[in-house]
Image: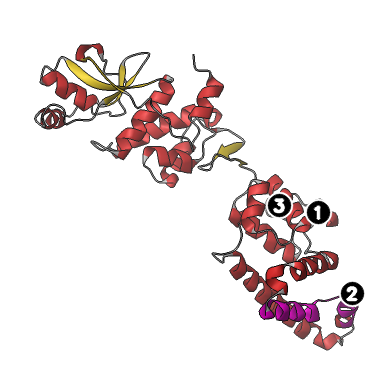
Amino acid sequence: MTTEKTFRQRAAPTHRIITSGRVYRVPTESVAQGESPRSAGIDREHVRMLANSGEGTLPPILVHSSTMAVIDGFHRLEAARLNRSPVIDVEYFDGSLQEAFLLAVETNVRHGLPLSLQDRKAAARKILSAFPEWSDRAIARRVGLDHKTVGALRNRQPKEAAATGSRIGLDGRSRPLDASEGRLRAQEIIAQNPQASLREVARSAGISVETARDVRTRMQQGDIPRGGKQGGPNTALRPPSQVEVVSALKSLKKDPAVRYSAGGRALVRWLESRLLNTEDAERFLQIPAHQVATVAAMAREVAAQWTEIAHQLENRRDTPR
């Protein structure tokens, strides 16, 4: 018997439930109708069309092995009965009833007589009740809806049914709904490895790429992470220290792709001449009071230009992920 844990592993949002692939000929009357995701029931006109298509031209129906209930092929079964066919081609599925329902929805969304919008919403509500930890996008992919529609359906669910502390996405990863802890992890990762790509930071911290980008930008600006708790000056996000920048530059100089190219060496020399040290910072603080606003504005403009360069670099298609 399939346990709940095993079922949830097999029916994870990223996994497709696999059938045996073997086709059997079984007595038509031994197959039951089962639970259909179609609220309108059987479309008799569609049944007649299938019945007139000719014997042997229709694919096998999909049947739940333990109950002999149809998962996919309700109209094909009725067409066989209309033609008084003694046998029908069957492919078996060995799994739980919940898995069978998921498979019924998936197969009917992908091919055959399309499910109505009402039926797809009903299927989404049923999956939300069974798997509240699945993300809106993961459920939307299964039922053929927009993720915003699934989100609206989730908001109408009973609070106790919809309340989970995390969501499992299309990639199979579980992410917390409150991203403050993930933001703090991202801060630590960026501080330890300033050269890490946004995708690497996001994957390691369990947050989205856009959240990782926001954390990095706030670190460069000296802000606290959005959604984090401000507990004093030590909780503020700070830009990488001078030691970290020097370390990153050393790593850059050791890279053969940089060392053995004229452009790479020129870039390293350019960066070395523009690194700010403690003495440079002190010189800025000694400017006349009436020029403070001007120099501060210049510093912000230069910082904005560097931020734009960083953004373009991180979005290069050939950037290592």
Mark found first going from the N terminus, 1 or 2: 1
Q: Find residue 186 and name its label.
A: 3
Name the amino acid, label 3. Ala
Q: Quadrant of the C terminus?
A: bottom right
In three-dimensional space, the C-alpha distance between marks 2 and 3, rounded to whole angstroms, equals 27 Å
Magenta range? 262-283
The residue shown at (89%, 74%) is: 278
For label 1, the SS is helix
Frontmost of labels 1 and 2 is 2
Depth order, front residue of 102/264: 264
Task: Give the secondary structure at mark 2.
Answer: helix
Q: Position of residue 214 (x, y in %)?
A: 65, 59
- Mark 2 vs mark 3: which is more N-terminal? 3
Instruction: Residue 15: give x, y in percent of width and height.
Output: 47, 35
Q: Residues within 10 Å of mark 2 (few under 14, many from 20)?
A: few
Q: Residue at x 80, y 76 (%)?
A: 275
What residue is shown with label 1? 235
Q: Position of residue 201 (x, y in %)?
A: 67, 53
The residue nearer to you, when weighing 7 against 36, is 7
> In this view of the protein, can residue 119 be seen by the observer?
no
In the rendered image, residue 91 lying in the magenta stretch gets the answer no
- Using the rendered view, name the quadrant where residue 284 is placed: bottom right
According to the picture, the residue beneath numbered tag 2 turns out to be 278
x, y (%) of residue 195?
71, 62
